[in-house]
Image (tube, grey):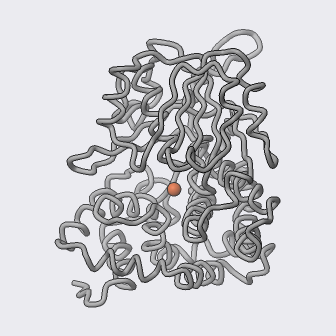
Amino acid sequence: MMFQSENGRSDIDLNKFYSDENSGRLHMPTTFFWGSGFIRNIPNLVNSRSVEVFIDGIVAEQMDLSWIDELNISNLHRTYGTPWVEDVEEYIEENPQNPECALVIGGGSTADFAKGVIARRAYGEISELGVGKRSGAQVAKSALPEIVGVPTTIGSGAESSRYFVLYEKATKAKVHGKSWALVASTVVVDPDLLRNLPPQVAISSAFDSFVHYWESLICKHESTFATRMFSKHGIAEVIINLKRVLQDSSDLEAWTNLGLNASLAGTAISNTRTGNIHEAAGALLERVNLSHGETLMVFAQSAYDQYMTETSTLLDNTVQQSGLVDFQSALNWWNELFEKYGMINKISRELNLILDLDEARQHIFKRVSNDKVWVNKESPIGYGDALIRDLIDEGFSKFLTDLVVS
Ligand SMILES: [Fe+2]
């Protein structure tokens, strides 16, 4: 994706450009709409163009879709659970062409499945697309659709992020990539789709957006004026509005704020990157039956303990608008919420079910240590092997009943 300067010269490839201390970038190719009942305006947004609909199958059963008949639908696909690479391949065999528009209604799994389908059709491949040495090397062989994203959770921000993650069925190994062309050009946050989220899902997904803001903020070089602005406002907003919806689930303004903050955290991450909490959690997710937010909780405290000295001033400031005195109090607040809603017990149960703990530790270690950009460049502290092992063992030790730390 080349940035066109006014004289027509293409100067900067956004896929290859990284922010640093001297030059920044905020790429935000999304228009946001929000409000109760706004989804009924989607036919006006899409107009008469052909549209492929990806929708979370469970959400589809619960929402009023009467307006959907007004669309010129080329295909409607329901997604269920984990986005598998094999399902993407099977789907595009029957549906090989990208339409003019894609309407994606769901959480991160639905968004990632749709991104996988769209990327596979346009680029011919998805594994490691645009990642590492392949940054900027992705060339679309056919036109990509305009994407309209309608999130139905308050966490992933996948609709406004250039990253996607799919999994292989046999190994549960992640297959990931990135492209700015996969970011929704329009995002609709309708609180009517969020207000019935069970508290555990709301807490787990809001914690995901909290960690997105947090990890984006502490990137040593890629964090910029603009992304810091998002994080400094967003971290307190997530806490304040989650408190509100847990007190009164009919508080539509608070649900809207949570939905918008999840999407804006996706924008922030898309301009920076996630860190060691996400790497460790992503690897753990391949070994346990937990939500993404629950696996983040396993490593959140131990990650903060490691770089507290370097980041506490920055992070303490972010939470004060929410009435909490410092970032540690915010982590304690999240921990109490997880405890209150049975999620700490669930995490403990799942971790104690891991049959080969050494294999799981090694698997997580490899994943974190292979993220060379984080380890060598963006981490707030020098991040050697001993600290990675400490992150894992300290994280596990809170949940495992008989862990022996070697
Ligand atoms: Fe996440």
Q: Is residue 184 shown to the viewer in this render?
A: yes
Q: Where residue 331 sits: x, y (%)? A: 59, 79
Q: Where residue 157 sits: x, y (%)? A: 60, 49
In the image, 74: left or right of 399?
A: right
User: What is the quadrant of residue 249 in the picture?
Assistant: bottom right
User: What is the quadrant of residue 102 in the picture?
Assistant: top right
> Most extreme residue toward the bottom, as rendered?
402
Q: Does residue 78 sit above or below 385 in this rendering?
A: above
Q: Does residue 261 sit above or below 32 in this rendering?
A: below
Q: Where residue 27 sits: x, y (%)? A: 67, 35
The residue positioned 41% from the left and 77% from the top of the image is 346
The residue positioned 44% from the left and 38% from the top of the image is 113
Question: Which quadrant: the N terminus?
Answer: top right
Q: Nearer the viewer, residue 48 or 14?
A: 48
Q: Nearer the viewer, residue 394 or 257?
A: 257
Q: Is residue 23 shown to the viewer in this render?
A: no
In the image, 184: left or right of 163?
A: right
User: What is the quadrant of residue 90 in the picture?
Assistant: top left
Q: Does residue 391 sit above or below 20 in this rendering?
A: below
> Most extreme residue toward the top, as rendered?
8
Question: Which quadrant: the C terminus?
Answer: bottom left
Q: Where residue 268 sits: x, y (%)? A: 64, 49
The residue positioned 48% from the left and 34% from the top of the image is 114
Q: Nearer the viewer, residue 107 or 167?
A: 107
**Exactly how many numbered labels are in the figure?**
0
The residue positioned 52% from the left and 41% from the top of the image is 111
In the image, 127: left or right of 2?
A: left
In the image, 20: left or right of 28?
A: left
